[in-house]
Image: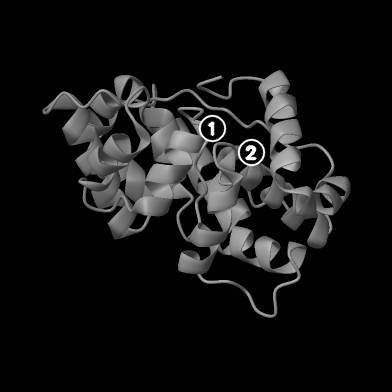
């Protein structure tokens, strides 16, 4: 299995993950259903992730709802044609406006193919995405996890994942991004399943609060 594309893949990956690390059994028992949340690997999916950077799930959902209504159909070409006005009206920060414009320019002017990028090796795909100003490791990893369906990515910079890993593994403190990245190495090649599991576990810890990026 090269890509996670449906709930059957989630089930297969979770069984393999629990065989790798039995410590996760109790976490899976609490977490319940491990979500898929797969999106199309195009401009719309990447735009939604950019909008969700560093804001609450509710705020991101509200802003993106306004944004996709103002930029219709939601594509790089449409955004460039409309300019910054719909992004301002949607409530996006100047930084997010800049990032979205740069992504749109990369697609329209430079031929960036987000769909094709999803079939590149993870490191190469991440490098191409993070070469665009405003796209950091978290954004690139979340795009490749939820839009490309890569099976071996763990966005260690995600605060919810850091908290869930710390609690779930009975660590004395919330681990840093570097520490989480090291911990997650044991879950390869199913780190994307592990990330989904710990997001679901975080929701359990927070009594149903959904913090998945998409």
Q: Residue at x 71, y 25 (%)?
A: 12
Image quadrant where one finds the C terminus:
top right
Q: Which residue is pictured at 71% across the width and 23% down the height?
A: 7
Residue most toward the left?
A: 109
- Residue 139 horizontal side relative to residue 63, left or right: left
Nearer-the-camera pick, 7 or 171: 171
Q: How crowded is mark 1: few (under 14 residues within 10 Å), some or many (20 or more)?
A: many
Label 2 close to label 1 by CB (< 8 Å): yes
Residue located beneath label 1 in the image: 151
Where, by quadrant of the figure, is residue 84 drawn?
Answer: top left
Question: Which image quadrant is residue 85 in?
Answer: top left
Measuring 67% from the left and 62% from the top, which residue is drawn there? 165
Residue located 52% across and 34% down the image: 146
Give whichever of discs 2 and 1 has the lower sequence position.
Answer: 1
Per the image, the residue denoted by label 2 is 193
79 vs 153, left or right, is left
Q: Position of residue 125 (x, y in %)?
A: 30, 35
Q: Pinpoint residue 39: horizontal percent, then vertical percent.
A: 53, 27
Q: In this view, does 70 lie above or below 133?
A: above
The reply to whether residue 90 is visible in this rendering is no
* Element class at badge 2: helix
Give residue 132's position: percent from left, percent from top. 21, 46
Horizontally, is 33 left or right of 181 in the view? right
Dot 1 falls on a residue whose secondary structure is: loop
- The residues tagged by marks 2 and 1 sit, at their Cα atoms, a distance apart of 7 Å
Question: Which image quarter is the N terminus in?
Answer: top right
């Amino acid at each position: 299995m090269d890509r996670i594309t449906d709930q059957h893949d989630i089930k297969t990956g979770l069984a393999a993950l629990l065989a790798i690390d039995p410590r996760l059994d109790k976490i899976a028992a609490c977490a319940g259903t491990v979500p898929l949340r797969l999106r199309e690997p195009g401009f719309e999916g990447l735009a939604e992730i950019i909008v969700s950077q560093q804001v609450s799930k509710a705020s991101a959902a509200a802003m993106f709802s306004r944004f996709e209504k103002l930029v219709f159909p939601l594509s790089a070409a449409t955004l460039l044609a409309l300019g910054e006005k719909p992004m301002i009206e949607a409530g996006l920060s100047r930084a997010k406006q800049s990032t979205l414009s740069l992504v749109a320019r990369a697609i329209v002017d430079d031929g960036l193919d987000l769909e094709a990028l999803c079939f590149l090796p993870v490191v190469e795909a991440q490098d191409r995405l993070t070469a665009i100003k405003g796209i950091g490791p978290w954004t690139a990893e979340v795009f490749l996890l939820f839009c490309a369906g890569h099976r071996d990515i763990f966005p260690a910079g995600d605060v919810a994942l850091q908290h869930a890993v710390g609690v779930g593994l009975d660590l004395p403190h919330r681990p840093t991004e570097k520490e989480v990245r090291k911990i997650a190495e044991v879950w390869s090649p199913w780190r994307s399943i592990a990330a989904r599991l710990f997001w679901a576990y975080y929701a359990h810890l927070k009594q149903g609060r959904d913090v998945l990026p998409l």
